[in-house]
Amino acid sequence: MAVPKKKTSKSKKNMRRSHDFITAPGISTCPQCQEPKLPHRVCANCGTYKGKEILNNTNI
């Protein structure tokens, strides 16, 4: 049976467990078209960000 030679430090233990508590990203709604989108990103549906048109729908 394998037995560790040294005690695993709190730092190493917590670094190993860092991905155990990942949460899903928050979803917000676009104020223009009310479609769900990731916060702080251009809306993929209508192409607006902070009330300004960033992407033309003809280019999409």
Image: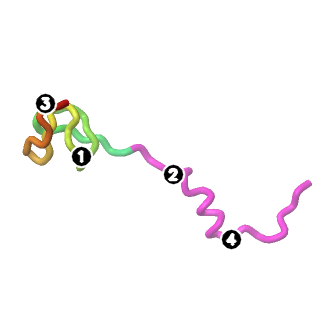
Count of all numbered marks drawn on residues in the image:
4
Q: Quadrant of the C terminus?
A: top left
Would residue 18 be counted in the magenta stretch? yes
Residue located beneath label 2 in the image:
21
Separation (CA) of disc 4 from disc 3: 54 Å
Q: Residues within 10 Å of mark 2 (few under 14, many from 20)?
A: few
Which three-letter amino acid code belongs to the residue tagged 3? Asn
Would residue 28 be counted in the magenta stretch? no
For residue 49, above or below residue 8: above
Q: Is residue 39 left or right of residue 9?
A: left
Q: Residues within 10 Å of mark 3 (few under 14, many from 20)?
A: few
Give, as a single range, the part of the protein colored magenta. Answer: 1-24
Callout 3: helix, strand or loop? loop
Which three-letter amino acid code belongs to the residue tagged 4? Ser
Badge number at residue 41: 1
Residue located beneath label 3 in the image:
57
Q: Earlier in the sequence, mark 4 or mark 1?
A: 4
Q: Earlier in the sequence, mark 4 or mark 3?
A: 4
Find out whether the residues at labels 2 and 4 contact each other: C-beta distance under 8 Å: no
Find out whether the residues at labels 3 and 1 contact each other: C-beta distance under 8 Å: no
Q: Earlier in the sequence, mark 3 or mark 2?
A: 2
Q: Nearer the viewer, mark 4 or mark 1?
A: 1
Find out whether the residues at labels 1 and 2 contact each other: C-beta distance under 8 Å: no
For residue 36, above or below residue 21: above
Separation (CA) of disc 4 from disc 1: 39 Å
Callout 1: helix, strand or loop? loop
Residue located beneath label 4 in the image:
9
For residue 27, which quarter of the picture? Answer: top left
Q: Nearer the viewer, mark 3 or mark 1?
A: 3
